[in-house]
Image: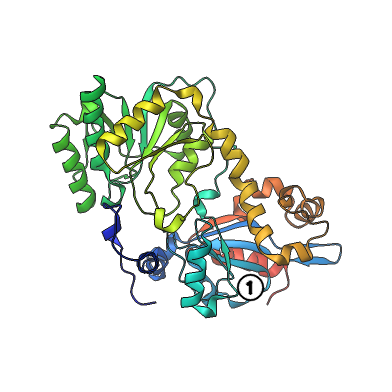
């Protein structure tokens, strides 16, 4: 791999005349991992452990951790692989670039893409491909419907204002909706920036945000005829603890991107039992036949146009009883399914964990007993972050301290 190249030619145009192999190569030409090699960004590296190493009754097994900074971490702690399977996360639709990872987050199960990748990089043939990303490691008990929330918001959006998110087409769809259905939608949009400010009159001052995000918001203002407040209630930032209330109060959640990673906003929406709306072309090259969501969790917009998006919004908000997003989310996603997918894919766990059953690692008795002995909490509590000090830390200083804890616990000098 050379320097990362942002594949912007796919962000606003769902059609390409390139071969699928060329498109895959373009997608894999970018990763956020490279950003985290700088000393400043190392303060933001995550170290997440969905399954810890275990030692119980003479049996010792490896754990699993994932990070967007695998190369940085392993350079400093090369013996970490003695007690962990290492999973790399590109934070994009690309396959990761990490040199020494045991497994990759690939977002989706796409056998043809995997075959192409291995033909191009045969040295990776021992790497496990996991159809997951960090967005799948959602705590479905924390991000859940709030009690008796009234559906007072028609459309809820949580995404940055960067060009990849295609915010202007949402603004165009809102205007199209008003024209076609004679109603102004109640739209709440959080751009995830603490640099913007909510003013007393309800408008948003975004003069201090990044230039390309500012340009997108200027386009939205132009599309809405300058009267942004009438159509969109913009929030600079909504705290995580408050998000479930907004999801639960919304009739649908809309994502307008065509290509990015496995978006967390979609998972949060479905976990809160709110149907999602995405363009059918969202990540289509990376996904192949793999769905964005399962069963009746939302709707795909058939074409990349404001009118099609407006029609799909109308369909969803006027047929609320049709959708069962949380039921489907619990069936296919959430933290239990996340770790079950990992341990089902990597043969080591089947071969080494006593009484292993496929897709049942989350309630394996030996794992639970071992976790209690080793970390003073059962495995369910570990998985769901009851003690994040031993399961999820951020920044190289905190990561180093946690790794030293594990080194000490498992006699690695």
Q: Is residue 389 left or right of residue 183?
A: right
Please name the residue shown 52% across and 31% down the image. Answer: 273
Comparing 387 with 83, the one in front is 83
Q: Is residue 346 visible?
A: yes
Tell which residue pokes out farthest to the right in this image. Answer: 57
Front position in the image: 233 or 171: 171
Residue nearest the observer in this picture, 297 or 229: 297
User: Which residue appears at 45% of the width and 42% of the height?
Assistant: 266
Give the residue at x 62% y 72%.
80
Estimate the x, y position of residue 52 in percent, counting from the top left: 68, 59
Which residue is labeled 1 in the image? 81
- Dot 1 falls on a residue whose secondary structure is helix
Percent x, y for residue 178? 23, 24
Total marks placed: 1
Q: Position of residue 73 (x, y in %)?
A: 52, 71
Residue 179: image location, x then y, percent: 20, 24
Identify which residue is drawn at 37% across, 49% down: 281
Quadrant where the image shows the N terminus: bottom left
Q: Residues within 10 Å of mark 1 (few under 14, many from 20)?
A: some
Looking at the image, residue 167 lies above or below residue 325: below
């Amino acid at each position: 791999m050379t320097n990362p190249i942002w594949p912007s030619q796919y962000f606003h145009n769902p059609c390409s005349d390139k071969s699928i192999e060329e498109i895959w190569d373009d997608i894999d030409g970018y990763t956020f991992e490279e950003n985290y090699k700088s000393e400043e960004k190392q303060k933001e590296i995550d170290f997440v452990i969905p399954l810890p190493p275990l030692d119980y009754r003479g049996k010792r097994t490896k754990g699993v951790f994932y990070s967007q900074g695998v190369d940085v971490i392993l350079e400093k702690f090369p013996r970490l692989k003695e007690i962990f399977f290492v999973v790399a996360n590109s934070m994009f639709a690309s396959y990761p670039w990490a040199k020494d990872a045991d497994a990759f987050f690939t977002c989706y199960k796409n056998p043809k893409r995997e075959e192409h990748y291995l033909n191009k990089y045969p040295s990776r043939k021992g790497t496990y491909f996991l159809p997951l990303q960090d967005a799948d490691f959602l705590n479905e008990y924390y991000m859940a419907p709030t009690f008796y929330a009234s559906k007072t918001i028609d459309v809820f959006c949580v995404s940055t204002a960067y060009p990849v998110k295609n915010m202007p087409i949402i603004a165009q769809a809102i205007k199209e909706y008003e024209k076609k259905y004679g109603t102004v939608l109640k739209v709440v949009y959080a751009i995830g920036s603490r640099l913007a400010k909510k003013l007393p009159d309800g408008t948003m001052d975004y003069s201090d945000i990044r230039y390309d995000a500012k340009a997108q918001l200027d386009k939205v203002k132009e599309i809405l005829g300058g009267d942004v407040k009438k159509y969109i209630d913009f929030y600079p930032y909504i705290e995580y603890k408050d998000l479930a209330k907004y999801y639960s109060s919304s009739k649908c959640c809309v994502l307008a991107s065509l290509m990015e990673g496995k978006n967390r906003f979609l998972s949060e929406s479905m976990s809160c039992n709110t149907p999602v709306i995405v363009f059918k072309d969202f990540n289509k090259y990376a996904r192949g036949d793999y769905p964005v969501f399962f069963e009746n969790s939302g709707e795909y917009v058939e074409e990349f146009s404001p009118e099609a998006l407006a029609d799909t919004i109308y369909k969803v908000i006027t047929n609320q009883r049709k959708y069962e997003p949380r039921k489907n989310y619990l069936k296919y996603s959430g933290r239990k399914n996340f770790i079950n997918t990992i341990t089902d894919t990597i043969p080591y766990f089947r071969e080494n964990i006593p009484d292993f059953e496929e897709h049942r690692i989350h309630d394996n008795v030996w794992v639970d007993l071992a976790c209690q002995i080793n970390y003073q909490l059962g495995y369910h509590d570990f998985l769901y972050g009851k003690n994040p000090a031993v399961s999820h830390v951020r920044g190289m200083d905190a990561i180093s301290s946690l790794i030293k804890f594990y080194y000490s616990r498992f006699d690695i000098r």
